[in-house]
Amino acid sequence: MNRPTHTMRLVLGDQLNAGHSWFAQRDPQVVYVLMEVRQETDYVLHHAQKILAIFAAMRDFARQLRAAGHRVRYVALDDASNRQSIPANLAALAAHYGAQKVQWQQPDEWRLDAQLLEWAATQPQAWEVVDSEHFLTQRGELAALMRGRKQWLMEHFYRHMRRRWQVLLDAGGEPEGGQWNFDHDNRKRWPGTPPEPADWRPQHDHSVLWDMVQRAGVASFGDPQAAVLRWPLNCDEALACLDAFIATALPHFGEYEDALASSAPRLFHSLLSFALNVKMLHPLEVVRRAESAWRAGQAPLAAVEGFVRQILGWREYVRGIYWAHMPGYEAHNALAHRAPLPQWFWSGDTRMRCLHLAITQSLQTAHAHHIQRLMVIGNFALLAGLEPQALHRWYLGIYIDAFEWVELPNTLGMSQRADGGLIATKPYVSSAAYLQRMGDYCKGCAYDPARKTGERACPFNALYWDFFERHAPALEGNPRLALVYRQLQKMPDTQREALRTQAGQLRERLDAL
């Protein structure tokens, strides 16, 4: 016979926060529910490692809760009673336990937020939504701060956050080093030294879990690497990764955060985004550890500020954008781009070496750093006119740290300008010159980065100029693009026509590039 249950609490797969106030006390009348459901594996096609890592981390979290004396009901993907949807399982379990109340933490994705609220409105039990106790802002805080402003500039928000949380400020409340942003110091090409640090992440054998996922018929893509999953599965492992990053990579992160290197695909990036986004780590503890490293003389200010800006600034900013503009943001396509993704997005089999390297790495590891995502893959997608919604689904599925609240504004807004410039003040595109300047991705490529037209010309070049010509009505009035349009206007008509023709031919045979 079941023990009395007053409250049933749902813990989603990206809410693995052992420090949540829910867990401060043991209550025998509270049962915690975690579930693996096809609803979540199937809403987009996911990378195998993403499915594995989330399920494995959920199972580890359930183990921790039980070890701490909490009541836990874990619904595995292959459980006979699993109805494969969150609402259906909640209804059945609430009836099973005779729960008088159902609670859940605020979901970070709009679809789950809406689904749970809709379900709760039809149920006999009382229900309550509580804060996830993770983020440093509330959902509507960015919109309130930016009310009345024409452009929601991240820099304004970032300075507000620095002051609010007293991060990297001197005794007078001014930014350490005399400036808020050291981005100009953080754009160097990596010369090969210092060497990329050894991979500090744990290794997990999840071949048994992978076998179960396959038997259940879950579709996925990418290399599962079931025997050597390289992602932290609990807070202790995540903190060990944070310590190793601070000690071995943060000192060099700033200078080379934008670099591209075929022999060192992750360079000095933290690889903490998965642990942060499933809430094993709290953003403020990560920021404070980085700040302490600078104050102790263990890392330069430019490196620490660049890292802090990504977490304290950009991460919270895009979440605010997401909640201010959902639902509906996901449908934006301001530039009316419609081309399907080339088939090599699923294989990496393209002769463009930069895209081959970035996509192959993504398929193998479920990860790519921000320049690979923005200035290699996203850059090409925008120049080629790929449909932003298709690209959004690909990014959401392939990257282990991708959850819609953070991925959607980054893809549709920052990368593809599908939101019409709500986030980015200009399109983030470049010709081959930028890619060649930032690393060795062009070395040995079948295409020549110096050529603009002809069979061996790098596709980025003609597509770059054609992009600005095609979208001149929407973009030529942007003061940040004045130089681009002056250059375009100075080109002889014959050169512009050759670039236009080259770009049109490229867009007609994207699969063959």
Image (cartoon, helix red, strand yellow):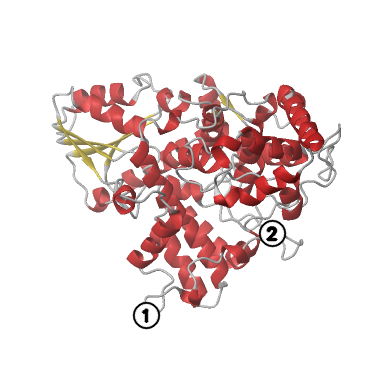
Label 2 belongs to which residue?
196
Res 299 quadrant in image: bottom right
Of residues 497 and 75, the one nearer the viewer is 497
Q: Vertically, is 51 above or below 234?
A: above
Q: Determine whether label 1 and label 2 are within 8 Å by CB.
A: no
Res 472 quadrant in image: top right
Horizontal and vertical percent position of residue 232: 51, 48
Amino acid on which disc 2 is placed: Glu
Horizontal and vertical percent position of residue 252: 63, 65
Of residues 205 and 186, the one nearer the viewer is 186
Of residues 419 and 254, the one nearer the viewer is 419
Amino acid on which disc 1 is placed: Gly
The quarter of the rendered structure image containing the C terminus is top right
Horizontal and vertical percent position of residue 10: 28, 36
- Please indicate whether residue 181 sits to the left or right of residue 465 in the image: left
- Please indicate whether residue 118 sits to the left or right of residue 335 in the image: left
Q: Kindly state the secondary structure of the residue where label 1 is placed.
A: loop
Disc nearest the viewer among 1 and 2: 1
Q: Residue at x 73, y 26 (%)?
A: 504
The quarter of the rendered structure image containing the N terminus is top left
Can the viewer see residue 236?
Answer: no
Where residue 49 is drawn, which disc sits there?
none
- Please indicate whether residue 136 sits to the left or right of residue 473 in the image: left
The residue furthest bottom is 171
Q: Residue at x 47, y 75 (%)?
A: 176
Q: Residue at x 71, y 47 (%)?
A: 487
Q: Determine the CA span between mark 1 and mark 2.
A: 37 Å
Of residues 353 and 3, the one nearer the viewer is 353
Label 1 belongs to which residue?
172
Res 197 quadrant in image: bottom right
Q: Tag 2 or tag 1, which sits nearer the N-term?
A: 1
For label 1, count other residues whose C-alpha is less than 10 Å away and answer few (under 14), some (14-19) or many (20+).
few
